[in-house]
Image: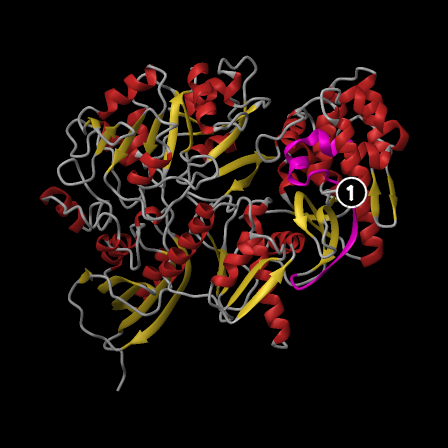
Amino acid sequence: MSDERNDIVRRRIVIKGTVQGVGFRPHVYHLATIHGIKGTVLNSSGGVIIEAEAHKSSIEAFVGDITRHPPSLAKIGSIDVSRLPPANFRTFEILASMPSNEAEAMIPPDAATCPDCRSDMADPEDNHHQYPFTNCTNCGPRFTIIKEIPYDRPKTSMADFAMCESCLGEYKNPANRRFHAQPVACPKCGPHVFITEANGSTIADKNTWLTKSWQFLGEGNILAFKGIGGFHLACDAKNRDAITALRTRKGRRAKPFAVMCRDLEAAARYCEVGKEEARLLTSPEAPIVILARKTGCPLPENLAPGLTSLGVMLPYSPLHLLLFSGPYDILVMTSGNATGLPLAKDNKNALAELGTIADCFVLHNRDIVNRCDDSLVQVIGHETHLFRRSRGYVPRPFPVKRDHGPPVILGIGGEMKNTFCLLRGDQAFMSPYIGEIDTVEGEENLLESLLRFQALMGIEPDIVAFDAHPAYASAHIAQKIHAEVYEEVYHHHAHLASVMADNNLENKKTIGVILDGTGYGPDGHLWGFEVLVGDYTEFDRLYHLAYVPLPGGEAAIRQPWRTALAYLHTFLGNKAGEYAKAFFRDKDTGFVGQMIASRFNSPLSSGCGRLFDAVSAILGVCSENTYEGQAAIELGELVAHMPAVSTHDPYDYEIGDGAILPGGILNGIIRDHLRGIPASTISARFHQTLVAVICDLAERAFSQTGVRRVVLSGGTWQNTYLFRAAKSALNARGFDVLYHRHVPANDGGIALGQAMAAHWRWRKKQGR
C-alpha cells in the first residue's frame, strides 16, 4: 500500500545549525501558512524538526523558501528531508521543545538591539518604553544567558522571571516577533537595574539609576557597569582627569581604552568611519572597531597614548542605549576586570574585584551565565580582520577540512589571548575570549568556560591538543581533561595549521611566514620570525631571524632597551658600547651587557616582536612595554596610514645558513637616527626592509619546495602597514597569499591549529 494518499505527502525535515533562539519556528510557521502546509515544528537538542504534510510541490517550495530565506540571525548547517506516511494533520502547530540525548543544536551568539526594539523603547505608549532589557527574536542575549539546550526559557537565566500576562501573550503569539523569544520581559515582570556603592548599599533604584549614572559621570566618577556578557568600567571620555584616575586605579599606564559612541554620527565626529567600518559598527555582532582618529580630534591623548587610532563601538544593548540617551555622546567603556583577572560577570565578585577601581556599581539582577568579552576588529584593505573573536561571533562555528564523523578534538590554546577550540564533525567551535591564564583565576576561568561549553554541546573530547612549552599552564590544564589521546603541538606549527584551517585548505604542503613575539621551538629556544614549510601534521623550519639573548628573560620583554642592547652587542660588536651610551645613558647598560656576554639568565630568541622592540627602543619611540606589544605597536603606528608601496629603499641585510642577519638593518637605522631622520621615515624604511626579507625568503622557499602558496599568521601580522605591504609584494611575485578569516592572527587563533594538527595526525595513524 502506498504511503502517500491522493498526492498528499508527509516529510520529516531536520534542520541543523544556528536555528534556535533566532525566530526560526515562527518563521517556519509563517512559511507553512503561505504554502498551505499542515503539521508541526519543534526545537530539539538535535536541531529544528518539522513534520510537513501537503502536496509534494508545496513541500518542495516550502523547503526551498526555508533554505533561501532563513531568519536574519539564523545559520543553516544542513537540511535533511525523509519520507513518512501521511498523518492527516488538520493544522500547523508549534510544539514544545523535545529533549534528546543528541546535542547537535547550535547556540546563537548575542545580537545587538534591532531597529524594531529601539523603536519600542522610544515609544511612550509601548510596553517596553525605556526598558533596559527589551529584546525580540531578532536581537538580544543568547549565548550569555543559556545554561543548557534546547534553548528554552527554563534553561536560561530568565527562568526566575515569570512572564506577565502581556509578555506571555507576545511569547505565545506566532505572529508576534517576540514569539518564543526566551528573554522576553517588560518592566512589570523582568529584571531591573540599580546602583550600589562598593560596599553593596543601594543608592539608586530602577527609577533613578539612569539620572544618577549621568550625575556620577559628570562628577568625574568611574562606573562599573554590568552589561550583557560581563562588566565594563566607564567614565567620561572627554575628562582627562577621570581617564587618568581609571589608569592609576586599574594599573594600566598606556594600553588604549575602548570607547562607546552614541551613534555613527558621534563616532564620525572623532574618527574616520568608512563604509565597511560603519557596517561593522551597526551589525548584529557590534564589535569594537579600530578607527583612525581624525586630524584635530579633541579627545584627550591619554585615551590611547602614543596611538593615532581608537577602538570604537556603538551601544549594542538596551542598557547602553539608555545610558547614551542623555548628555554623553562618548564614554570610555573598557573591560571590567582588575589587572590579571578575568572579566567580572557576577555582582558579588564585581564588588570585591572592582571595589578599588569603581566609585559606584550599575548592576542588574539577571545573571550572566557565560562570560563573553567584546570582540575587536579592524578593516585592512576593505577586509575585516578579527583581533579578538568573542561577543557577537561566539559560539557560531565555521567549516574545516574534516570528515563528518571523526573524533571530537579539543585545542586548549596558549597562555596569552587564550581561546580554546572544539572540533565536532566538520565544524570548528571557538570559545569566547578567555585572555591571560598565568594566574590561578585565569586557569579557573579557562577550565570553567571549557566545561560549560562542552556541556552546551553535549560532548567530551577524545583527543586534547596543547602547546609544547613545558611550563605553560594551558598544557597542565590539558592533562587534567579526560581524553584518550594527548597531542603536543609546537606553537608556530599551530599558527601554520590555524591559517590553513581558517581557509579550509586540504592537507598539502604550504609555506608559512609566521611572525610573532614568542613561541617555544623544538630546539628549546624562543621562536618568532619563522619561514616554515609544512602541512597539518608536520613542518620544517627553512629560515629564521638570527638568535639574540634576552637578558633577564621576561624583563627584556618588559624593557625593550634590554633587547636593543642584546642586538647591538650581538651584531654590531665593538660599536655596541658607544651606541648603548648614546641611546640608553640612563639605563644600567653595564650590568645588562655582562648578562649578555655571559648568557646569564638570557634565553635565545628569534622573535619578530623582539626585533620591533629593539628598533622602537633605539629610536626612542618606546623603551618600556606596559602592555603586550606596546613598543611594536607604537613603532607600527608611525606608518599605519602610509601607502603600502614605499619609495624608501630597504636597509642592507644578509641571509646565511638559514638565518636572517640583521646587522646591516641596525647599522642603517642607527645611521639615519643619528643624522636626524624622522622616526616615521626610519620606521617606514624598516618595515619595507622586512617586506623585502619576506619576499626574498619566500622566493628561496619556492626554489627549495616548488610551493607557491604562502600563509601568514602570528600577532605581528596585525601590523596594518606590514600586512598590506607584504601581501601586495608577494602577490606581485606570483604567490598565492592566504591569511586569517574567522580567527585572529594572534594567539587567539592557535587553538584551531592545535586541534587540526591533532586531527590529521590521528588520520595518519589510522592509515587514512
Describe the colour scheme in one phrase.
Answer: secondary structure
- Residue 600: where, in percent of width, then height? 75, 42
- Residue 683: where, in percent of width, then height? 73, 26
- Viewer-closest of 465 and 308: 465
- Residue 254: where, in percent of width, then height? 55, 25
Name the quadrant of the N terminus: bottom left
Magenta residues span: 536-565
* Residue type, numbered disc 1: Arg
Residue 19 relative to residue 540: left or right: left
Work out whether residue 411 can be spotted.
Answer: no
Work out whether residue 18 can be spotted.
Answer: yes
Q: Using the rendered view, name the quadrant where residue 489 is placed.
A: bottom right
Residue 156 relative to residue 345: left or right: left
Residue 173 relative to residue 25: left or right: left
Q: Residue at x 85, y 36 (%)?
A: 571
Residue 4 relative to residue 497: left or right: left
Mark 1: few, some, or many residues within 10 Å (few <14, many ≥20)?
A: some
- Residue 747: where, in percent of width, then height? 58, 46
- Viewer-closest of 278 and 437: 437
In magenta segment, residue 230: no
In magenta segment, residue 541: yes
Tally the marks.
1
Q: Using the rendered view, name the quadrant where residue 165 is placed.
A: top left
- Viewer-closest of 442 and 112: 442
Q: 657 above or below 337?
A: below
* Residue farthest to the bottom, as pictured: 1
Q: Using the rendered view, name the quadrant where residue 95 is placed.
A: bottom left
Circle 1 is placed at which residue position?
599
- Viewer-closest of 762 and 732: 762
* Residue farthest to the left, as pictured: 165
Mark 1 residue element = loop
Name the quadrant of the C terminus: bottom right
